[in-house]
Each structure stands twice: as structure tokens, then as C-alpha cells.
Image (tube, helix red, strand yellow):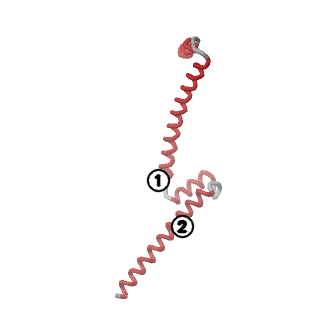
Amino acid sequence: MGKYADSIKASRQHMSPQKIAEEKNARCRARNAQRRKEVQEEVSERLLHWQSLSLEQQLEQLDARLGKDVGAVKQRARILHSIADRANKAIANDEARRAKKKKKKKK
């Protein structure tokens, strides 16, 4: 064993088994907290990247990762619904502009 392991072993000789377990649990909690923080940072980075993609790019990413129209059914439905909403709004805006132009020409 290394020097560190020997020093821990020597310091534990005078500790009760309960105290040893508490010390070990405290180290585990600290490691787990650090790992949770790292994972949370990775999640936020992935989310920012995903949100920076256009809707069409998000669909392409899903197709590349999972295969064409395979898996992520709800996510694909949300994306396709958003694309359709965007297209419908664009059509409605065009019709509104045309109606305004028509009114101006009649005057």
C-alpha cells in the first residue's frame, strides 16, 4: 500500500467502526456532490447547444443519432408541430399584408 493508505489505516486503528463508516459516508457524499455538479454543468451545456439549433437541425440531429423516424416520438412531434405553427403564422402574416395592400389600393 501507498503512504496515504497506510496513514489512513493507522489513523483508523483508534476509531470505532461506526466512526469509520461515518467518515467514509462523508467522503462519498462529497464525491457525489461534486459529480452531481459536473453532470449538471454538462446537462446545461448540452441543453444550450440543443436550443441553439434550428428546428430543422434538431430533426436532423435526431435522425443522425437514432435513425430516420426512429425513436424520440414525442420530441419529433413537438418539433414538427412547432415547424407547422411557424409556417401557419408566416402564411397568416402574408395574407394579412395582402389584405392591407388591397385595402390601400381600393382607397
Q: Nearer the viewer, residue 93 or 10?
A: 10
Residue furthest out toward the right = 70
The numbered mark at residue 52 is 1
Q: Nearer the viewer, residue 42 or 63?
A: 42
Q: Which residue is mark 2?
A: 84
Quadrant of the image containing the N terminus: top right
User: What residue do we see at 50% from left, 49% from top?
Assistant: 47
Q: Quadrant of residue 59?
A: bottom right
Question: What amino acid does circle 2 point to?
Answer: Ala
User: What residue do we see at 57% from left, 26% from top?
Assistant: 25
Q: Position of residue 20 (x, y in %)?
A: 58, 19
User: What residue do we see at 52% from left, 57% from top?
Assistant: 57
- What crowding class fits label 2: few (fewer than 14 Cα within 10 Å), some (14-19), or many (20 or more)? few
Q: Position of residue 104 (x, y in %)?
A: 36, 84
Residue furthest out toward the bottom = 106
Choose the circle earlier in sequence order: 2 or 1: 1
Whole-angstrom CA distance, mark 2 to mark 1, is: 19 Å
Residue furthest out toward the left = 107
Q: Quadrant of residue 62?
A: bottom right
Question: What amino acid does circle 1 point to?
Answer: Ser
Q: Is residue 104 above or below residue 28?
A: below
Question: Callout 2: helix, strand or loop?
Answer: helix
The numbered mark at residue 106 is none
With 55 as the anchor, is 104 left or right in this view? left
Q: Position of residue 81 (x, y in %)?
A: 56, 64
